[in-house]
Image: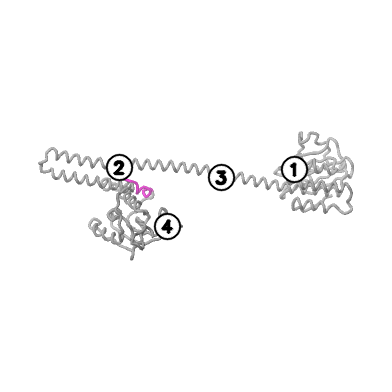
Amino acid sequence: MTVGTKIFGVDGALRDAIKFAAPDRSGPEHASTLRTLNAFAVDIISIPNVEDLFWYVAQNVVGRLNFVDCVIYRADAEETTLTQAAALGEKNPYGRTIINPLRIPFGQGITGQVAETRAPIVVDDLLKDQNYIPDTRPARSEICVPLVSQGKLVGVIDSEHPQIAAFGAAELEVLTTVAAMTSAKLELLAEVERSNQRYRDLVQSHAQLTTETSNRKALETELFNVRKLEAIGRLTGGFAHGFNNLLTVIAGNLELIGADPAAPHSWDCLVDAKNAADRGARLIRDMLAFAQKLHLDPKIVDVNALVRAACEENSRSLSRDVALELAADPWPIEVDPGAAEMALVNLMMNARDAMPDGGRLTISTENVVRDLLDDEVCPIDCPPGRYVRLSVSDQGAGIAEDARQRIFDPFFTTKQVGDGTGLGLSMVQGFVRQSGGAVRVRPNTPEGTVFDLFFPIVSRRSDGSVRANG
């Protein structure tokens, strides 16, 4: 005899139990069954795990429904074997401890058949059933129902009786309802376990991410310190070497003058000593610009006029024409004119040296606006506002990526020995930053390099004063 039902949850299973209780089923026994199922529906909410659920069903539900005994089997994950998980009656004389739990393969015996077919079975006379596996105390009738959760067979509930035909339709309906309620709770427990596992995975992922972030920050800090020490070492080493050479020139020439002040070459020695001192002063000034400690005398200037003056004064040194692409009406900027021209000349000479075989040298100016989320127009270290962009571009071979990361380092140069100190670009960057702006280097199209200098603009107030980035 088999019965199939569709269960939607614990409440649905309890409603089915009430529906199964036909009007002609009355009396104390029927009322006791409903009270037991109702108590199960209430208590099932607080059952914390599968083991406690099976023992509760065996002892507090089936045990109170006038079944002589009860054995609950749990299926393995592969759905191949049933293992005794809870029991009531003579088959469980040790409380909640099962000695040598019985294992039944799917398909073997009545219990294994229920597990394989997922259909409940009622056997009136076990001695006439070839699937019956005799126990130490053979029974005469048996009832067995499956436990199905989320489409998987998770176990079976089995009960035997010493009398023939001890189980009928009423017992099958009740035990099927108990199985449905148990299966519904198993689904809830499985969902709780999945939620707990997801939470544990998130905690583990967060801990791993936190560790990786901490390690990355530590590595970044260590790398920054190493690079800082390297830069300081290169800076001090280059400065000491360059300044020592200049002092050697000055001391040597002064020694020659001191040996014979009236000698014809004394004047030349004095000139050489003065030139070396001037170079030392420029070296100190470049170092101060790199450190953003240069003494500046900012004034409001027209960047176009600054560009034209620098090109005119250095036309002979450039030894080529310069293409000017200047904004029609550039916004005013406030910079030290001398330092700004020196920075521009540095970039112009670098552009000239990058094109030994000729090429186009272009200087352009443009008014630009950086929005809050715009990193394309201006570098990210420029706060939102209005800027004047001064660009110097060449059509040379370009700058290698590894060198591009170091071009602003002091004393770094790709030129031959004696052709440059390596302080030009570091001075440019230091001056622009000290003026409140930023420097960007990018590839030219189709070849070459572009250096962009961004200067914040100033605007005049009603009283005639000015404010930056107005």
72 vs 378, left or right, is right
Quarter occupied by residue 230: top left
Q: Secondary structure at mark 2?
A: helix
Q: Secondary structure at mark 1?
A: helix
Name the dominant secondary structure of the magenta segment. loop
Tell me the crowding category of disc 4: few under 14, some 14 to 19, or many 20 or more residues within 10 angstroms, Cα based.
some
Residue that label 4 marks: 384
What amino acid type is highlighted by mark number 4?
Pro
Answer whether residue 227 is visible to the viewer in this image.
Answer: yes
What amino acid type is highlighted by mark number 2?
Gly
Whether residue 115 is situated above or below residue 454 in the rendered picture: above
Label located before the other in sequence (2 or 3):
3
Label located before the other in sequence (4 or 3):
3
Q: Nearer the viewer, mark 4 or mark 2?
A: 4
Q: In the rendering, which numbered label is found on residue 321?
A: none
Disc 4 vs disc 2: Cβ atoms closer than 8 Å? no
Q: At which x and y percent is residue 371?
A: 44, 59
Alpha carbon separation for disc pair 4 and 1: 64 Å
